[in-house]
Image: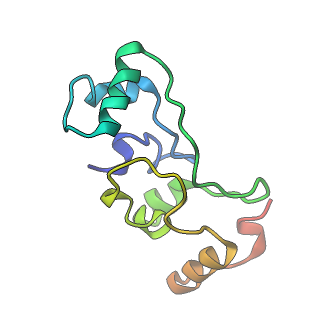
Amino acid sequence: MACDECHLYAVNGVRATIPNIAVCGDCHDEPLTESIHEARLMEYVNSDTPLPWQKVYWVPDHVYFSHRRHTGIAGIECQACHGPIEEQEEPLTRPLVRLTMEHCMACHEQTGTSNDCILCHR
């Protein structure tokens, strides 16, 4: 499954977005697995109750990050920043990869992208 099937703007938007109940209900209107996590998700979908997502990936307010620039334009795979997210069988409670300035700068260096401060710091 592609990340942007649930995170609708992961390729074309600044923010990937966290799926709302309508997005989840598009696929999870009937059980796909016997997972306890999917069963809980189904309860939210069937009762049309907003999901209590907990955001685990973020950058500080003074940092500008665009998913579109990274995934859509540069073609960077989601796993470069989010780790092997596709292997997870339950909701994350912490990031798989610690997103630090050093992490970002190392990637910029490896890909030949500028590390000029003004590109990311606003």
Percent position (x, y) of residue 98? 59, 69
Is 65 left, or right, of 69 in this rendering?
Answer: right
Residue 105's image quarter? Answer: bottom right
Residue 76 can be seen, yes or no: no
Residue 59 can be seen, yes or no: yes
Numbered-mark total: 0
Which residue is rendered at x = 30% and y = 30% of the image?
Answer: 39
Residue 99's image quarter? Answer: bottom right
Percent position (x, y) of residue 40? 37, 30
Percent position (x, y) of residue 36? 31, 37
Give the vertical position of 45 relative to 115 (above or below).
above
> Looking at the figure, which quarter contains the C terminus?
bottom right
Which residue is rendered at x = 41% and y = 22% of the image?
Answer: 44
Residue 84's image quarter? Answer: bottom left
Give the vertical position of 69 relative to 4 (above or below).
below
Residue closest to the eye, 115 or 29: 29
Which residue is rendered at x = 50% and y = 81% of the image?
Answer: 111
